[in-house]
Amino acid sequence: MEEYPPYFDKQLEDCNFHDAGDLEFPLGNTVKSLDLIQKNVDEIYRDGKKVFGIGGEHLVTLPEIKAVSKYYNNLAIVHFDAHTDLREEYLGEKLSHSAVIRHCGDIIGFENIKQIGIRSGMKEEFELMKKYKTLIHKQEELDVLRGKDIFITVDLDVLDTSVIPGTGTPEAGGLSFNELINWFKYLSEFNIIGADVVELAPDYDSSGVSTAVATKVIRELLMIM
């Protein structure tokens, strides 16, 4: 990968970042795994830094938001995804990737969430998005979040399956890579205080294209932080 992203005319060396390594989770224990994430993210913000989470299924965003919300009282989420993630539970489990944004909304308020690229979910979830006007289609609709502290969460299935087939729940009709970058360009004018990129499943794409796309998404998102 080149160190110069032409979209933002910056070098990677222009960004002050550190790879803190991987977290090791207790196998099969969701609650302890989430607690471990929250503890580590809390330490990052206590040290005056920002988190950029990479990898995992989308539920990892919940403990990040729990930790970050302790340090910002004006927090908002910009959520890129194919799916609503607004269920109260999924298959009897409340701690689910299908419910992660619902839980985050309970923490920061649904009026502080904007969702982009959503094209799959239950009717009740779409009604919830309509009630709080979370689903947006134009960049200018983000302007209501100006002045807020923004956490960006990117589920890679927001991109079309032709762009990134290697994800757990692919959905046709998604964004192109350039459309996603244009959203990032608009968000570069906002106060980004944290981010994550989740749901890459490289074993589902033996070509390696999905991994290459994911690394580009990470690189470009880093440019606006």
Image (spheres, helix red, strand yellow):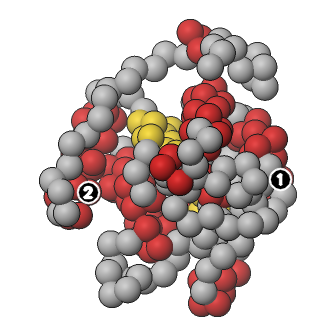
> Would you name the residue on which mark 1 appears?
140
Classify residue 85 as left or right of residue 135.
left
> Which label belongs to residue 34?
2
Mark whose residue sits in front, 1 or 2: 2
Residue at the outermost front position = 206
Task: Inspect this view and state whether residue 47 appears.
Answer: yes
**Quadrant position of residue 83:** bottom right
- What amino acid type should be assigned to the residue bearing mark 2? Leu
Rendered location of residue 93, percent (x, y): 32, 81
Nearer the N terminus, badge 1 or badge 2? Answer: 2
Number of callouts = 2
Rendered location of residue 109, percent (x, y): 50, 69
Rendered location of residue 2, percent (x, y): 66, 15
Classify residue 169 as left or right of residue 59.
right
The CA distance from mark 1 to mark 2 is: 34 Å
- Residue found at x 38% / y 24%: 19
The quarter of the picture where the C terminus appears is top right
